[in-house]
Image: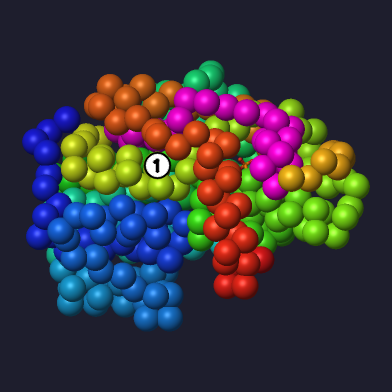
Amino acid sequence: MSEAMKLTGKSIYVAGHAGMVGSAIVRRLSSEECQILKTTRAELDLRDQGNVNAWMAKHRPDVVVVAAAKVGGILANNTQPAEFLYDNLMIETNLVRAAHEVGVEKLLFLGSSCIYPKLAAQPMAEDALLTGALEPTNEWYAIAKIAGIKLCQAYRRQYGCEFISAMPTNMYGQNDNFDLATSHVLPALLVKVHQAKMTHKSTIEVWGSGAPLREFMHADDCADALVFLIENYSGESHINVGTGEEVSIRELAETICDVVGFDGDLTFDRTKPDGTPRKLMDSGRLRSMGWSPRIKLREGIEATYRWYLDNQRIIRS
Ligand code: GFB
């Protein structure tokens, strides 16, 4: 850890501010006295190097948060490998290089727990990176995110840039993607269970065997950890951001049924992939710096369901 960075008076570019994590970061930063810079996809295509360079040269932010990414659940990752690799590589390389060119003070790059090998020892510590083969359903996304970590390390080593990386676990919360074909499991099951309740169905379909274990973190907890890292962490290693608690997909589905108030049965579609059998991160480094999560899974699911009910008309589904 280096000297703490104060965000007061800084201009902070949150790339990806409309997404689940980006919007949570913007909410979290609203309590700091800083200026938040945002760009919409229509204003600035982050895959376009020339436009990113020009935007960065004009606005010269003090801090950049790379929360923009092409993201999705297991099926989207498995069926759109080209975009998951290309879009993510372009977004991160354009932002990192442009940030260096204009002398950004600090940059935070966001990755994902899928950077670790499919069969990594659990819980997965930061040094498990590149010690084994990746999970095939998301290796395209994982390779792009590993390249992003390495890019930050390379600019730090060669040019002394204050570029750091954080690897959040599976996240959920408001502004998530609720489209059943492309979403992650938690929003997908919320929608399926809600629809089953409303249409008086007797079962809902869960993909895979229900046995995989996952660790879930509410986006607001994650945003708090990310701001903590910007303020307090400087180093070459990426930092894991997780809760340390895992549940099986079956248990998750049962909790969601309980929260929504649906007492039908679960059926398991085993033609769909399970993906990584277990994905629990060792977030000991972050804990030892003094940060801990606050939102329990059930409480976070309840809040997300309330948000979903209030925003059904405007959300992507
Ligand atoms: O959340 P999810 O799509 O992503 O799936 P991953 C987690 C588990 O939930 C898998 C099962 O075992 C799915 O088969 N599952 C059950 C479902 N029902 C459903 C459903 O209706 N929809 C979805 N989507 N899953 C992603 C990676 O992996 O995690 C990304 O592909 C990224 O690259 C992200 O790393 C955090 O946890 O398997």
The colour scheme of the drawn protein is rainbow
Residue 183 seen in this snapshot: yes
Is 101 or 269 nearer to us in this picture? 269
Residue extending farthest top:
121
Is residue 245 rendered magenta in the image?
A: yes
Q: Is residue 175 depicted above or below 147 in this figure?
A: below
Residue extending farthest right:
202
Point out the quarter of the image occupied by ligand 1.
top right
Using residue 315 as the reference point, say whether residue 223 is left or right of it. left
Looking at the picture, how far across and down is residue 179, in whole percent? 67, 62
Which residue is rendered at x = 39% and y = 33% of the image? 293
- Looking at the rendering, which quadrant does residue 297 occupy? top right
Residue 147 seen in this snapshot: no
Which residue is rendered at x = 24% and y = 65% of the image? 36
Name the residue tied to disc 1.
221
Is 50 or 195 nearer to us in this picture? 195
Using residue 193 as the reference point, say whether residue 134 is left or right of it. left
Which residue is rendered at x = 32% and y = 59% of the image? 26
